[in-house]
Image: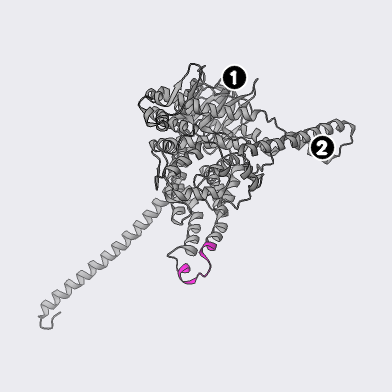
Amino acid sequence: VDPHHSPDTKKKIMSRMASFAARGSALRRGLKYTAGATTVGAGAYAYSKYRSDPGLQRQLQFWSVIAPVVADYWWHVGASSPYRKYVASDDKDEAVAELHRRNAPRLYRVMIDLGSLYIKLGQVLSVTALPVPEAYRVYFRKLQSDVPGHEEFEQVIRPTIERELGLDSIEDAFDHVEEIPCGAASIGQAHVATLKDGRRILLKIQYPDAPWQVPADIRCVGDFMKMCVWFGLVDEDASKLSYDEFSRQFLAELDYDRERRNLEEVYQSSLDPDAPYRKYNVVVPKVYPELSSSKIIAMEFLPGPKLEQEAKKLLKSLGIDTSKGVRGIVTESARKAVDTEGNSDESSTESHALPANHWSQSAIKLVSVDTLFSLTRWARHIASWYQSMWLTSLSWMKPLGIVPNRWQDWMEIQSENQYNGDWTKGAVEALLGVHGYQILNQGLFNADPHPGNILLVQDRPTKIGLIDYGQCKRLTTKERVKIANLMLSVANDESDEAIADRFRDLGIATKNDSTPFLAEFARLCFGPMQTKHLDHSWHREFHQTDRVLYFPSELSMVYRTSLLLRGLAMSLQQNVSVSEVWRDHALQAVKDGQPELLTEDAVIDESQLFRRRKTSSVIVELPPSQVELK
């Protein structure tokens, strides 16, 4: 207020200032109340969202454990961490190793607590080719032998069956349904049921929580993979490809309608007399659509143990540690032999099925892999024969009462572990033959043929049953022809240029586009295992020459299938070349899909299909004077 103003003017100015102050105070009170109400409202919304969204609850449970782990890594080894900049005096590599040892048990526990997809993720990470730290891999291997829990029959399974099939009571359609599941997985479980006419069928039932639980878990896994990339635990490109494939597979497994259609199509193709199913005594269960829904698949019950159980007996007799599960042994056997990333740990002393574990490196360099496998099988057969003779002698003496109790206990254990090894060669041949037919001739195949999805059906003769078609892949005719050409090039040991070109046709990309690398990589994936492949240093040197930047999606599932089947063969002490076993199927695929290529690449005979050398390669080897005549 100016002192020269009149009293009336001063009075008016003071009145206006008082009015402005009152308005400002009211505004501040309004903003305070508004902020408080907004905070309360946001809190109430967040709480209601938390209570109503079980997926959010699982994510918060996951990150409540993972967030401290993230903070632990950042504080001790993060580039921007004040502790690492100004306080830490230890070696960073040693600090990282200690962090792995400290946090691996934490991650393992949260996987156990959450179950479902996290168990499967741990199983995948325990045998993946990605450079997962050994401290984590040790804990993840424990998940291979963990059997997923199952839902209660009366509270969950019975209501699901009645709701999905529109039944007032489960007894309206079934004479009996076994309450204990014969199998359980991350998204569902299977029960044996008996129809009113006495037929036994299998009901594969999806858990009611699976449709929201799996997507929520996949989002958490994606964030977790980003965290691993940020801390340099895994390669960004490789982890993205792995995560994309992982998420696609599990989201596809939720689609029971799609799985049922795939199973019906494969079953119908198995009835074709020209298909190899009858030749190899392989059966696929028949589907019952009238008893199926979007959450239930009803199929023919195939009686018999899983190949996993019989393989465990054989592996034990071969002196192989089965504590981490047969699936882990099969996958790791193939991974360590192929090692497509060059990440094998040479210092690892863990037992596996490769001959390198049973023979010295000097012996490996002198003889072939096939010889090593033969010697190993021969030694184990001799040991098994002696054990069998000893058990027979003790069984004769047992009625006389002269066999000590501890010997009798040993007899029971060893008798349970006895196996008939005659089935192994035929089983491997049948599995490779049928899957080669599905991939190259039918274009629809199961991309997850692990031993838990294969049955030894109790019949005369024993048949092989193929179950679980949740992870199927479909190939176009063009894709099958390209894959067939690659298989033929590898099977016939063509030149590096020819094999590399076939690989490039499929879209594979490497950093240096090295022809020798591409050719050797294809042989490594689909050819026979060679002695040099047992040397970890060879893999490291090989992958230093070039690096895969993109692996075509249509080939990745084919490679996964061949990897699992090859791993099964190797764990059973058999060295197979996938490309050679699939040669006839590849020739037929080329003949059916692109006949014009056949005149250049192969000759068809009425009795058999066989391949001869390319015309172009023959011309190159001829003298110039004969080229035109040829």
Q: In this view, does 334 lie to the left or right of 247?
A: right
* Mark with earlier residue (2, 1): 1
Please check the rendered image and state whether residue 225 is part of the magenta-colored stretch, yes or no. no
Which x, y percent locates residue 114?
53, 46
Q: In this view, does 593 lie to the left or right of 317?
A: left
Above/below status of 303 relative to 33: above
Disc 1: CA contacts within 10 A as few (<14), some (14-19) or many (>=20): few
Q: What element carries label 1?
A: loop
Residue at far front of view? 625
Question: In the rendered structure, which segment of residues is drawn in magenta?
Answer: 82-95
- Amino acid, disc 1: Arg
- Amino acid, disc 2: Gln
Look at the magenta stretch and give its main secondary structure.
helix
- Looking at the rendered image, the quarter that the N terminus falls into is bottom left
Above/below status of 102 relative to 250: below
Residue 470 visible: no
Residue 627 visible: yes
Q: Are marks 2 and 1 in contact (CB under 8 Å)?
A: no
Which residue is pictured at 46% across the width and 41% down the height? 246
Where does label 1 land, which residue? 199
Q: In this view, does 614 lie to the left or right of 354?
A: left
Where does label 2 land, which residue? 408
